[in-house]
């Protein structure tokens, strides 16, 4: 099955700096790569996703890049704000609609 | 759009009793719903996938007789934890996938189950 690794597990940045979270996956058949933000005590919220026919996607301060050859994808958050503090999960999906989640990154934005 | 609700948001029950958790897609139809379990500071673990009108598909290691899933309509799925024990205490999260839109999933807010 699919295996998704995520780094780093924790990340602290100063407000206004950029944050980068990286994930690798194992199944070359995966073609859907979502990113989720989870605040304490809440369910994950889809913040951005990318499909395998696209190399990069941007939505305001958030961008995701995908390198299918290397089987890795990254989340980039620019101009970080305190409200960006949360746990971020990457995931990879292929057949049967289900996705496999990474282990999560706890992002702390220091004011 | 794409709002998923869960009820209850938290529940405390005694060991040996059963607990039902509801998951509803409020503004879209969900052919497929997923149930996850999450331990503190850990990732989401998929328990089962359910398609409306069909039996749920359970992941390896998940006891189907203990975690009963019913996907009765395109907007409602339920998870019943039967004969709950303290080790079943966890955060249970459902997600729903809009019909015909591939793998996109929208998550509910989760249900905190504590078994005493």
Image (tube, coloured by chain):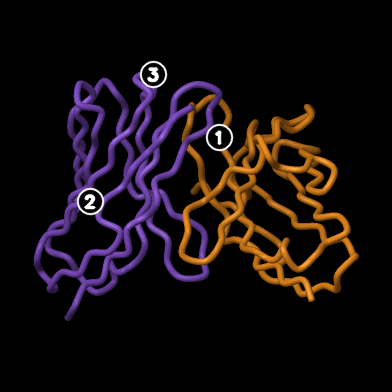
Asked if B76 appears above or below A29 in the picture, the reply is below
Proximity of marks 3 and 2: CB atoms separated by less than 8 Å = no
Q: Position of residue B101 (x, y in %)?
A: 49, 28
The picture places residue B30, in percent across and down from the top left corner, at: 63, 36
Task: Specify whether disc 1 shares its chain with disc 3.
Answer: no
Residue bearing mark 2: A21
Q: How far apart are labels 1 and 3 at the CA level?
A: 22 Å
Residue A47 drawn above or below residue A65: below
Q: Residue at x 71, y 62 (%)?
A: B7
**Disc 3 target residue:** A29
User: Is B60 on the left or on the right of B107, as rendered?
Assistant: right
Label 2 neighbour load within 10 Å: few <14, some 14-19, many 20+: many
Chain seen in orange: B
Residue under pointer 1: B98
- Kind of element beneath mark 1: strand
Residue A86 horizontal/vertical position (percent) = 35, 66
Q: Chain of mark 1?
A: B
Tell which tag, 1 or 2, sits nearer the viewer: 2
């Amino acid at each position: 099955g699919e295996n998704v690794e995520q780094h780093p597990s924790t990340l602290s940045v100063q407000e206004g700096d950029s944050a980068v979270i990286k994930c690798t996956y194992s199944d070359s058949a995966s073609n859907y790569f979502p990113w989720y933000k989870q605040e304490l005590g809440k369910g994950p919220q889809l913040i951005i996703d990318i499909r395998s026919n696209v190399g990069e996607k941007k939505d305001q301060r958030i961008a995701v890049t995908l390198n299918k050859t290397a089987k890795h994808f990254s989340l980039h958050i620019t101009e970080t704000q305190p409200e960006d503090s949360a746990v971020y999960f990457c995931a990879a999906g292929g057949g049967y609609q289900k996705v496999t989640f990474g282990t999560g990154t706890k992002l702390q934005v220091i004011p | 759009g794409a709002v998923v609700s869960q009820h209850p948001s938290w529940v405390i029950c005694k060991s040996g009793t059963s607990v039902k958790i509801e998951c509803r897609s409020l503004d879209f139809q969900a052919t497929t719903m997923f149930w996850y379990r999450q331990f503190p500071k850990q990732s989401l673990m998929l328990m089962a996938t359910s398609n409306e009108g069909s039996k749920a598909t359970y992941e390896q290691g998940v006891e189907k007789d203990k975690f009963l899933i019913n996907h009765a309509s395109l907007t409602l799925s339920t998870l019943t934890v039967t004969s709950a024990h303290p080790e079943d205490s966890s955060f249970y999260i459902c997600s729903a996938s809009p019909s015909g839109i591939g793998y996109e999933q929208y998550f509910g807010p989760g249900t905190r189950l504590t078994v005493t």
